[in-house]
Image (cartoon, rainbow, N blue to C red):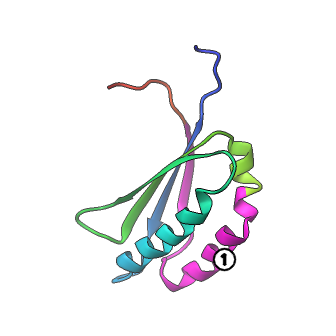
Amino acid sequence: ETDKAQNGIVLIKFKAQPEMGGQTVSELNNLIEKVKEEPNFVSIKLHVDPNDNTNILLYEEWEDLEYYNNEHMNTEHLQGFMSNSVNFLTGPPEISFWQVKRVFK
C-alpha cells in the first residue's frame, strides 16, 4: 500500500484579537460547514488552546492539495471569511503543509 497517494495535511494557526476567541471559533464553525461541501475535503479538526482561547489551530485533511491551493482558496465562502477576518483576527494565519509518514495507534 506504499504507492497509494497520501492525503495532504494542512495546519492553520490563527491568532484572534483579545477577547475575540469565541467569535473566531464561531466564524470558523460557519466557514467549515461550507468547506465540508467542497470536493476533495476529508476532515477538519478545530483545536483551541486551553490556556489562551485566542490561539486556534485547524488540522485539515484534503485529498488534493492542488485543489486546496487553487479552487478552495478562491471560493466565495473563504474569500468572505478572509475579508471579514480583520474584525476578529490579528492578521493572516500561519499555514503549513504536511504529509503523513506513519500512523501510530
Q: Nearer the viewer, residue 69 or 91?
A: 69
- Relative to 21, say whether 38 is above or below: above
User: Toward the viewer: 74 or 16?
Assistant: 74
Q: Quadrant of the N terminus?
A: top right
The residue labelled by disc 1 is: 80
Residue appearing at x 36%, y 77% in the figure: 22
Q: Is residue 58 left or right of residue 72?
A: left
Q: Is residue 77 magenta?
A: yes
Using the image, determine if residue 33 lies above or below residue 89: above
Q: Position of residue 102 (x, y in %)?
A: 45, 24
Q: Amino acid at mark 1?
A: Gly
Q: Is residue 49 covered in magenta? A: no
> In percent of the image, x 61 and y 60: which residue is there?
35
CA neighbours of label 1 inside 10 A, class few (<14), some (14 to 19), many (20+): few
Residue 66 found in image quarter: top right
Residue 25 point in image, percent of width and height = 42, 71
Quadrant of res 71: bottom right
Query: Which residue is at a point 31% across and 70% down the rendered structure image?
Result: 53
Number of numbered discs visible in the structure rendering: 1
Measured from the top left, where is residue 23 in percent x and y? 41, 80
Residue span colored magenta: 72-98
